[in-house]
Image: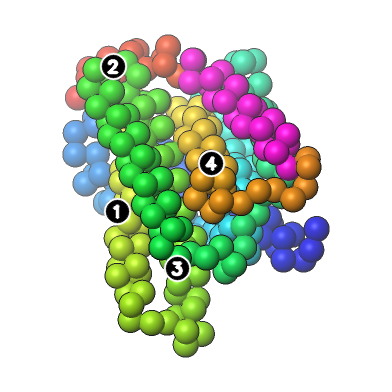
């Protein structure tokens, strides 16, 4: 492993810890609200929620950008999930959340996926990925469109299965973050070229589109996450969010970037990591969906 890869991995892990510290503070702010009505309007006036958001924006986001620039958008989400340890410990200490044996196993499996993703070294050199080629942009476009359709599906399913609303909102947020990270990686390279005086006005539409996509999906993901927190425990919902956040980049590695791993162990390690994520999330989601009807009724009574 070279220094560039190690630096990128370190940035991703620290970024994940900071994002989850911010998430915990946001969850605590949500817990102080008595109903889901006008939730975001109330949260933006909460010092605790604002502090959590600023930790993510001012500290976590720059490190995430550094990681994306050094090792690409494929394994960064997987490495960032190391922050789940911070979230789990904080949720038990400050949010009075409790873990059963199955839920502990779920968090451990998600953490194991971090190690496997890191060992797989499925990194992407975005500067050599041909992001300005028409074929690449076409693949990026249809891949993003499919993810948007899945987001719409999660949103519609919330209406038909209100008892699963917390999990569905979390999955929706994970899909939105996947779109955001993918486009953010591309946008980072374009802006880097701009700073190196290699920018052409013909690329301005790509910059505007990329900025619109990352801004919109990022804000929608934040909103969906906060709405999910009103219905469930952060320590169980966030690992579920990592399912699309970790699997989508792996699909993008093959379908968007058209890359093939050079190391023969990369694919088995990555598939094992995906398996750990799915099983871990299943253990967490099952308990969370069982809790949601009770939490929804409690929220209605308080409202």
* Disc 3/disc 1 C-alpha distance (Å): 22 Å
Quickly name the residue at label 1.
Answer: 216
Residue 202 lies, in percent from the top left, at: 33, 77
Q: Residue furthest front?
A: 135
Q: CA distance from mark 1 to mark 2?
A: 26 Å
> Which residue shows up at 32% across the image and 41% down it?
148
The C terminus: image quadrant? top left
Kindly identify which residue carries mark 4: 251
Residue appearing at x 45%, y 19% in the figure: 288
Does the CB distance between marks 4 and 3 fall below 8 Å? no
Element under disc 2: loop
Sequence-earlier tag: 3 or 1: 3
Dot 3, crowdedness within 10 Å: few (<14), some or many (≥20)? few
Rate crowding at label 4 as few (under 14), some (14 to 19) or many (20 or more) other CA atoms within 10 Å: some
Magenta stretch, residue numbers: 266-287
Q: 85 or 28, which lies in front?
A: 85
Magenta segment: does it hold 157? Answer: no
- Give the image quarter of residue 203: bottom left
Decide if residue 228 is on the left or right side of residue 235. left
In front of the other: 218 or 210:
210
Distance from label 4 to label 1 (Cα)?
Answer: 22 Å
Toward the viewer: 210 or 300?
210
Residue 228 horizontal/vertical position (percent): 35, 32
- Where does the image place residue 238, in percent across and percent down from the top left? 49, 34
| Circle nearer the viewer, 4 or 1 | 4
Which of the two labelled residues, at mark 4 and mark 1, occupies the earlier sequence position? 1
**Labels 1 and 2: the sequence-earlier one:** 2
| First in residue order: circle 4 vs circle 2 | 2
| C-alpha distance separating marks 4 and 3 | 20 Å
């Amino acid at each position: 492993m070279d220094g560039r890869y190690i630096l990128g991995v370190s940035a991703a892990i620290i970024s994940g810890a900071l994002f989850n510290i911010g998430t915990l503070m946001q969850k605590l702010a949500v817990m102080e609200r008595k109903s889901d009505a006008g939730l975001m309007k109330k949260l933006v006036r909460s010092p605790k929620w604002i502090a959590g958001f600023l930790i993510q924006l001012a500290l976590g986001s720059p490190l995430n950008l550094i990681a994306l620039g050094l090792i690409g958008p494929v394994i960064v989400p997987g490495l960032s999930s190391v922050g789940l340890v911070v979230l789990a410990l904080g949720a038990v200490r400050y949010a009075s959340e409790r873990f059963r044996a199955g839920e502990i196993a779920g968090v451990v499996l998600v953490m194991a996926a971090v190690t496997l993703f890191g060992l797989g070294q499925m990194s992407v050199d975005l500067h050599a990925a041909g992001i300005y080629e028409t074929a690449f942009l076409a693949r990026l476009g249809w891949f993003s469109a499919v993810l948007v359709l899945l987001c719409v599906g999660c949103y519609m399913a919330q209406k038909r299965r209100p008892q699963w609303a917390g999990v569905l909102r979390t999955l929706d947020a994970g899909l939105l973050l996947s779109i955001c990270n993918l486009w953010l990686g591309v946008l980072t390279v374009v802006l880097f070229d701009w700073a190196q005086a290699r920018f052409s006005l013909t690329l301005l539409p790509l910059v505007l589109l990329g900025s619109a996509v990352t801004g919109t999906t990022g804000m929608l993901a934040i909103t969906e996450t906060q709405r999910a927190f009103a219905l469930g425990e952060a320590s169980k919902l966030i690992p579920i969010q990592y399912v699309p956040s970790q699997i989508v980049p792996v699909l993008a590695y093959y379908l968007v970037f058209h890359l093939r791993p050079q190391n023969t162990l990369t694919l088995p390690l990555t598939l094992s990591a995906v398996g750990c994520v799915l099983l871990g999330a299943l253990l967490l989601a099952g308990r969370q969906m069982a809790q949601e009807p009770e939490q929804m009724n409690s929220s209605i009574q308080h409202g």
